[in-house]
Amino acid sequence: MTDTPTSKPHTPKALGMIVDALMYILLLTQMLYVFTGNTIHEFLGITFMLCVVVHIVLKRKWIKAVFKKGRKVSKARRFSDVVTLLLFLAILTLAVSSMGVSRVLFPWYKYVGSPALHTYLATTVLALSVVHGGMRGYFLAKSKKKVVVLIVLGAIAAVAIGLALVPYLNRHFKTVSITYSEKVAGRKITWNGGKTLVVYFTRLGNTDFDEDVDAVSGASLLKANGELMGSNQLLADMIVDAIGCEQTAITVTGEKYPSSYAATTSVAGKELSNKARPAIVPIDTSEYDSIILVYPLWWGTIPMPVATFLEQSDLSGKTIYAVATQGSTGYGSSISDIKKCAPDSEVVKVTSIYCDDIPNAREKIADLLEEAAK
Ligand SMILES: Cc1cc2nc3c(=O)[nH]c(=O)nc-3n(C[C@H](O)[C@H](O)[C@H](O)COP(=O)(O)O)c2cc1C
């Protein structure tokens, strides 16, 4: 069959529009990985990258034109070109970081494996895509001002989705079910940290969870063999399994934290600004050489009950191995705050684990601890 003169130019245009729409849908769907799960997220990621390649092939004439010498263009066109170039670079970097955090498709790739960086790059790609797509509307529209306002609002919305909505959904709607022994049991390590106590803090056990906690907030909660479990507790159990030491939880004795995640953040925020030291069940550390402190980041630092533990225990001369967990902020200021609370101890950074990665952290944490106490 031969192409009619009218059918030929229409096919790529229609294909281009479909690919463009698909790319936006894929980007947004990928950001909702809390609902799709990791495996689907990774396959959607590959599909997105394939769409990018198709998009570039379809736009090859335009790309050639951009690089033509002596091309005279308006300021708006130049701005659009710069955005496109930045978007291209952001997508390339996102591809590398996607491989770094991949657990299913690229488990062998070990570079740029920061989930936080991955989140920032994905947000950047979404925001730049909005501007990139919006500029097309700008060139076509009569009322340019309206389009500019829409582009700015769209970019702000993209940043808010990436940096606020996605982490919010992640913490509020996700309950992860695991088989306890599969996640906790593993290689025993050579531990040179002397007699060691693992001290952990987690929401579970310190929170007034409602009976129907799953409906209220799956918030970073785990179900190990069908039972709720704090993710920092799971991490502590992994460490105990790897080292063969003892462990204890930091437990508040006064009012517990509220069931709702948002309310907990508000209480924790007030505690931090008031430098509160909530009362806890005393922990005897006298017979130990080292403490492995497993704690979640709260407002970019240690939760205040952890500060209580550090200040009321005599930790002088002991080594504190810091194992943090978090939703994006690495160690925040937790290390310097631990040092302030325990000035006569040596504080060793072990790792800061992204909350989603905790159930699969067994071997990594064992390796890092072995390395930290060498
Ligand atoms: C009150 C509160 C404040 C938090 N603040 C931060 C934060 O500043 N930065 C961060 O990356 N994660 C933050 N998170 C997320 C927790 O660090 C993360 O979900 C952790 O893995 C929870 O562990 P758990 O389930 O054992 O309590 C916060 C969580 C809560 C409840």
Image (cartoon, rainbow, N blue to C red):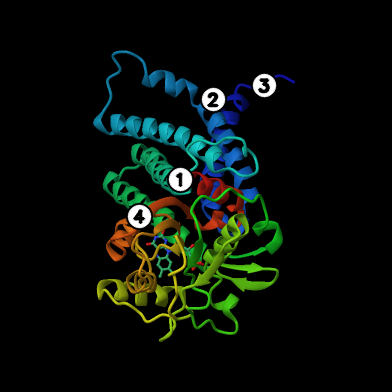
Q: Mark 2 points at which residue?
A: 57
222, 30: nearer the viewer: 222
Could you tell whether 157 is left or right of 287 in the image?
left
Task: Work out whether mark 3 precedes mark 1 in sequence or the reverse, and give the earlier one.
Answer: 3
Circle 3/circle 2 CB separation < 8 Å: no
Circle 4/circle 3 CB separation < 8 Å: no
Q: Mark 1 points at which residue?
A: 122
44, 214: nearer the viewer: 214
Identified by mark 4, the residue type is Glu
**Where 196 sits versus 146, above or below?**
below
Q: How crowded is mark 4: few (under 14 residues within 10 Å), some or many (20 or more)?
A: some
Identified by mark 3, the residue type is Asp
Q: In which quarter of the image is residue 343?
A: bottom left
Which residue is drawn at the image coordinates 41% and 45% (left, top)? 130
Cα separation, mark 1 vs mark 4, equals 37 Å
Q: Which mark is residue 346?
A: 4
Residue at the outermost top position: 69
